[in-house]
Structure formats: C-alpha cells, structure tokens
Image (tube, rainbow, N blue to C red):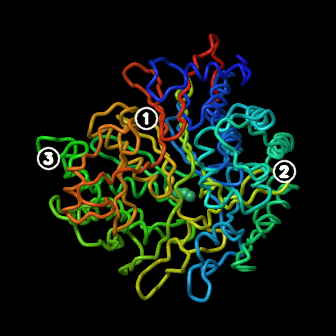
C-alpha cells in the first residue's frame, strides 16, 4: 500500500491521539511530532518493518524538529528482533575528534563558560546518526536508505506548519538561532522569529537529503558535506577566539564507526529491563535507582507509600541522589575507561547503598560509593568529578511493527538547536555533544578518580539517553524513552514505577507528574505545570519534603512543582491479546499512529 504523505494528514488528524488507542494487531508508531509519526506510519503501510520506519521517522524529525535531533547529531537505537528474541543497541553516539584533549574546555585553570563553549565549533562531536540509521537499515531493515528518506525530503521541500513547540524553542533559544547567519536565515527569516502556524521550507536540507539518498552516507562522511562540516565547526565565538575552534578533521569523519552493543539487563519486582550500556549512563543509573528502591513498598498506600506520598517521593529522591553520585564518578565511555558495571549493579553493593536511605530522614550529601571490591579491577576510593549543567532537549520515539519487531530510539544534537551552527549550503545543525564531557579534567590516580567522563581522543561523551524495553516472562511488553539530558533517566524511572508499582495504564504513567533529582546535592524538580499531569503532587506533600530538608521546592506552603520534565513516547505489547498499542506525551506534540496490516502480508526479512 502506498499512501502519499499529504493524503495521510487526515489520517494523522484522525488517529493522532495522546491517549491509548484501541487494541489491534497493528504496527504502531509513537513520536513527538505528528508529521514524523506519519512518515513512520507511511513506511509501515508500505510493508516496511520497524527498522525501516525508524529510519523514516528519524529523517523526518531532522526536518520538523530540527532543534532536537538530526544527521548532525547522534543517538542510541534499541532494536528487538521478533524472530530471534534478540535485543541489541546501535550506538551512534558522537565521538571526540582525534585531536581532542582532556583540557580542551579549560582555559588558565578555569572551565570555559558553557554558553560560549557550547556555541563554538569546539563542542561539535563527529556526528553518528546517519551511520547509525544506515547500519540498522542494512542489517535489519528491508528498505533502501533512499526510500526511507522520501517523506523527509517531501517535508523539507514542500514545507510544514511550525508548531507551538518549535515556535517556543525559537523564541526562547538562548541566542542559538541568532548567532550564525545560516541558522538565523532559516528560523528568523528577515530577522523575524518563525511563529506557530508559519510555513517552513528548508531547501538546503532537502538538497542534502537528496544527495545522501542518491550517493549514500559516504556523501556525508567522505564527500562534499564532510568538507563543509569541517569548515563550519571551525567557527568560534570572539570571546574565546581560536580556543573555541573545532578540532574535527576529514579523517575523523571518514573513520567514524557505530558500535553494535548488547543491552544492559536489569530486574525489578519480577520484570526485566533492557537498557543502554555505556557510554550512556541511561541503563546503569536507571537500574541502580530501581534496585535501591526495590526494598520499599512504593505501591502500598496502607504503609504510607503510594503515588505522590511524601514517603514515596522522599525515598525516590534519596535513591536518585545516591545513583547520580555514582554516575558522576564511575560512568563514561567503557571503550576508553574501565567502568565497573558489575560492581555498580552487584546486589551486595546495591544493598550497602540502599541501606543509606532512611525512609524518615534526608541523608547528608552522598558521595559516590566504591563498587570496585564488588568488581574485578582497580581498588581505590573516588572523589567526585565536577559536573556541569546538561541540556533539556533531544527526542525519543518508539515503534512496533506487525511482526513484533521493536525500535526504541533516542537521538539528539544535545542542546536545543545544538551548537547553533548550520552547515552552510547544507541546511542541518551541528551538535554540541562534546559539552557532555567534563569541562575540567577529573582523573586523579592518587585519589582513585578514573576521570571516566574526561575528554579524550575518539572517546564518546557520557550520555543519559535511555531507550528502554520492559519485558515480562521473557516477552516485550513496552518500549519507551525520553529526551531531557540527565532528567531522561528519571523520566524513564517515573514511568517504570507508575506502571509496575502504581498499576497505571501506559497513558496514565506518561501523563502523571514526574519527580527528578540529577545531583547528589539535589535540588528537587517536580511537575504540575499542566492540567493533564494527574494526580498532582499536593502542597502538603511538598511541605513534608521541605521539612525533611529537600531543596528546590520554593517557599513553604507554595506549589513548587511547576516544571515540565521529558517527553515519553511508548509502544505497548499486550501479551494476552497479541495486540499493539501506543501512548504519547502531551509535553510535546506526541502522536500515536496505528497502521492496519495489509491484506497480503509480505514476510519480514527478520
Ligand atoms: N545530550 C543528551 C544526552 O546524551 O544525554
């Protein structure tokens, strides 16, 4: 079946919903933008599998949500193959160039100011998204790269309506759409920021996508686009001069490689999770927090727990503080530094860490633990690394096809609008992913600090991206993930607790307000800024947390839970009925589209 994108618009309007759709044995896409969801649905309707549809969605997102992800960035794609039951990760995380050094974001013993460093070419990592998508397609897809790019090319050439979220991101861009002329020309034509409802055509981007469709990824990694990328990332900010110039070379681009990894597996109350291994902290830290919490009856209101109770929120905060203390010291690119994964997830180690949580009192600022005795290598006690703020943007989508193949994919250009540098003549934004590294080198052999996330040549910066697959009795039941920098981990965690401990439906689990702490010191971020976020965290609960010494909630008696955290797009597989559903997030323009199977099903190649 072949459906033109334009004629799919009615279908989008008809089927797009932020609530769970009626059950049916269909393919389902859940994406943060309806036009990108339609690209995935069109691909499924043409007989493509989940990997083909994921490619189409990612390219379309590059057009309609260019501030969050694209071929100038990187990501982590979790793939579950129905036939073999295998789950694997395509890691297309950006890499530091060969000339990167541990002190490149430091100047005269001080970290460069983040706003300057992150909008200079120095922050640009070697992009991985295109190689990642191409690798996934070649190995597990059924369609050609060019076919999966067709919807994106149409969207870039013909244009699309700027939605509320893009308009807001332009209006509140921290200067990133204004600093470089090519970016300003696209998103602020004539100096006027695009507003909701404006029509956006991206001719340069369409040309680039056509070039890649015609010549393959080498046009990007070795051809004319590579030359343009190298030149563009030599741009710097006057305030930091040559120190802010990117160090990427043609050789770095030509040698970029994706890694196909095994997922990290964790267990929680009889459920199994497959999550991201390093260089993402997504899987390790999520599983750590769950294991620290497992001894508390979080769903039991009779014992003072239950959703949104002070007790539940307190122990969640404490578990997050402990796990993020470990994350700051121990997690980085395991190809470059030893990451004690076995120790960090060892039941003995986790029991010793969980014992630090007092259900009635807030602990003092926790230090990272020492998982090394529970592991096989090294044996010194660490001191915390300095960390810096992390961006709140990125994107996540989830897809299941009619055969049961699943993709859960988080991708990013790091900050909203990335580095703010559009590659001249090619119309796509470059990432600022290298700012996910420590700005100041932290490795210290005497102190036992491994410098897990210090910059190094060809290293991947630590990520928080956490596409996750939830399984019961060995069968996939849900796949989801979120954008949001370090808060990604907590968005995924909140959804897991809502599903497993609080018995919510997938849509309720996504709608419910979230709680997040991303540093050992706090502070607490919590939601309540939109009406759909139910049930609310009451002011009485917030007062109880304040009285325990938790910070970030504002004045006593006020509602300090006003934030918006993440944007979770999920697909759900009902084991009992064999049906597939989706649930999407109103925190962006989340869209679920269900695609009915064609009458004559082409066999999946998987
Ligand atoms: N840049 C966001 C992340 O990797 O977590």
Between disc 3 and disc 2, the foreground one is: 3
The percent coordinates of residue 17 (x first, y second) are 50, 26
Marks 3 and 1, the one that precedes in the sequence: 3
Left or right: 235 in relation to 457: right
Picture layout, residue 128 above or below residue 123? above
**Image-based side of 353 in relation to 520, left or right:** left
Q: Which residue is mark 1?
A: 478
**Which numbered circle lies on residue 304?**
3
Of the pair 521 and 437, the residue shown nearer to us: 521
Question: What kind of element bears circle 3?
Answer: loop
Query: Is residue 403 among what the camera can see?
Result: no
Q: How many residues crowd mark 3 within 10 Å: few (<14), some (14–19), many (20+)?
A: some
Distance from Cα at disc 3 to Cα at disc 2: 60 Å
Quadrant hosting residue 140: top right
* Whole-percent x, y for residue 319 in the image: 29, 59
Q: Which marked residue is nearer to the observer: mark 3 or mark 1?
A: 3
User: Which of the two discs, 3 and 2, labels the residue nearer the N terminus?
Assistant: 2
Q: Quadrant of residue 111?
A: bottom right
* Mark 3 sits near ligand 1, with its Cβ under 8 Å away: no
Viewport quadrant of the N terminus: top right
Distance in Å between CA atoms under marks 1 and 2: 37 Å
Image height of 577 relative to 146, above or below: above
Return the x and y of residue 173 as percentages of the image width and height: 62, 56
Q: Residue drawn 67% across and 47% down?
A: 66
Of the pair 371 and 304, the residue shown nearer to us: 304
Residue 122 visible, this orientation: yes
Q: Secondary structure at mark 1?
A: strand
Relative to residue 51, is residue 391 drawn left or right?
Answer: left
Q: Quadrant of ligand 1?
A: bottom right
Element type where label 2 sits in the image: helix
What residue lies at 82% left-to-right and 44% top-to-bottom? 212
| Residue under numbered circle 2 | 219
């Amino acid at each position: 079946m072949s459906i033109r994108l334009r004629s799919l618009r009615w279908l989008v309007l008809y089927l797009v919903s932020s609530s769970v759709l009626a059950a049916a044995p269909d393919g389902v896409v859940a994406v943060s933008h309806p036009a990108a969801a339609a690209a995935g649905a069109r691909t499924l309707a043409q007989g493509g599998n989940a990997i083909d549809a994921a490619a189409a969605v990612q390219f379309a997102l590059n057009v309609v949500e260019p501030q969050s992800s694209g071929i100038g960035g990187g990501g982590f794609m979790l793939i579950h193959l129905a036939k073999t039951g295998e789950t694997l990760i395509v890691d297309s995380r950006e890499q530091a160039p060969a000339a990167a050094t541990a002190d490149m974001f430091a100047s005269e013993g001080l970290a460069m100011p983040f706003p300057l460093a992150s909008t200079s070419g120095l922050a640009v990592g070697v992009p991985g998204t295109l190689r990642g998508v191409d690798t996934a397609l070649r190995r597990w897809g059924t369609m050609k790269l060019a076919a999966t790019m067709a919807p994106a090319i149409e969207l870039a050439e013909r244009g699309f309506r700027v939605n509320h979220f893009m308009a807001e991101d332009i209006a509140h861009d921290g200067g990133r759409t204004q600093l470089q002329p090519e970016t300003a020309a696209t998103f602020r034509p004539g100096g006027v920021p695009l507003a909701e409802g404006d029509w956006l055509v991206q001719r340069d981007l369409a040309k680039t996508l056509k070039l890649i469709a015609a010549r393959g990824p080498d046009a990007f990694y070795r051809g004319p686009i590579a030359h343009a990328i190298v030149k563009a990332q030599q741009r710097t900010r006057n305030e930091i001069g040559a120190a802010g110039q990117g160090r990427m070379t043609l050789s770095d681009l030509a040698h970029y490689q994706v890694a196909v990894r095994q997922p990290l597996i964790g267990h929680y109350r009889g459920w199994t999770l497959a999550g991201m291994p390093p260089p993402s902290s997504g899987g390790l830290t999520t599983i750590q927090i769950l294991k620290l919490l497992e001894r508390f009856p979080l769903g039991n209101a009779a014992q003072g727990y239950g959703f949104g109770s002070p007790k539940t929120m307190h122990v969640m905060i404490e578990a997050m503080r402990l796990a993020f203390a470990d994350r700051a010291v121990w997690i980085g690119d395991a190809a470059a530094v030893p990451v004690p994964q076995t120790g960090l997830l060892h039941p003995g180690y986790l029991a010793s860490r969980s014992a630090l949580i007092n259900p009635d009192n807030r602990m003092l600022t926790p230090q990272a633990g020492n998982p090394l005795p529970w592991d096989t290598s090294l044996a010194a006690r660490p001191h915390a690394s300095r960390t810096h703020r992390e961006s709140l943007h990125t994107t996540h989508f989830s897809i299941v096809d009619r055969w049961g193949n699943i993709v859960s994919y988080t991708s990013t250009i790091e900050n909203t609008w990335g580095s703010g540098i559009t590659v001249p003549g090619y119309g796509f934004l470059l990432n600022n992913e290298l700012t996910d590294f420590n700005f100041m080198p932290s490795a210290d052999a005497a102190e036992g600090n491994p410098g897990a996330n210090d910059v190094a040549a060809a290293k991947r910066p630590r990520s928080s991206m956490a596409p996750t697959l939830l399984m019961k009795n060995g069968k996939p039941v849900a796949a989801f993930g979120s954008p949001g920098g370090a808060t990604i981990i907590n968005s995924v965690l909140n959804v897991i607790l809502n599903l497993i401990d609080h018995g919510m439906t997938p849509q309720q689990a996504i709608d419910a307000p979230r709680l997040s702490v991303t540093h050992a010191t706090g502070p607490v971020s919590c939601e309540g800024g939109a009406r759909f976020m139910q049930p609310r965290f009451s002011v009485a609960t917030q007062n109880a947390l304040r009285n325990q010494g938790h910070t970030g909630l504002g004045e006593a008696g006020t509602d300090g839970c006003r934030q918006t955290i993440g944007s979770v797009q999920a697909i759900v597989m009902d084991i009992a009925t064999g049906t597939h559903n989706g649930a999407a997030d109103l925190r962006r323009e989340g869209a679920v589209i269900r695609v009915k199977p064609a009458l004559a099903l082409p066999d999946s190649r998987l």
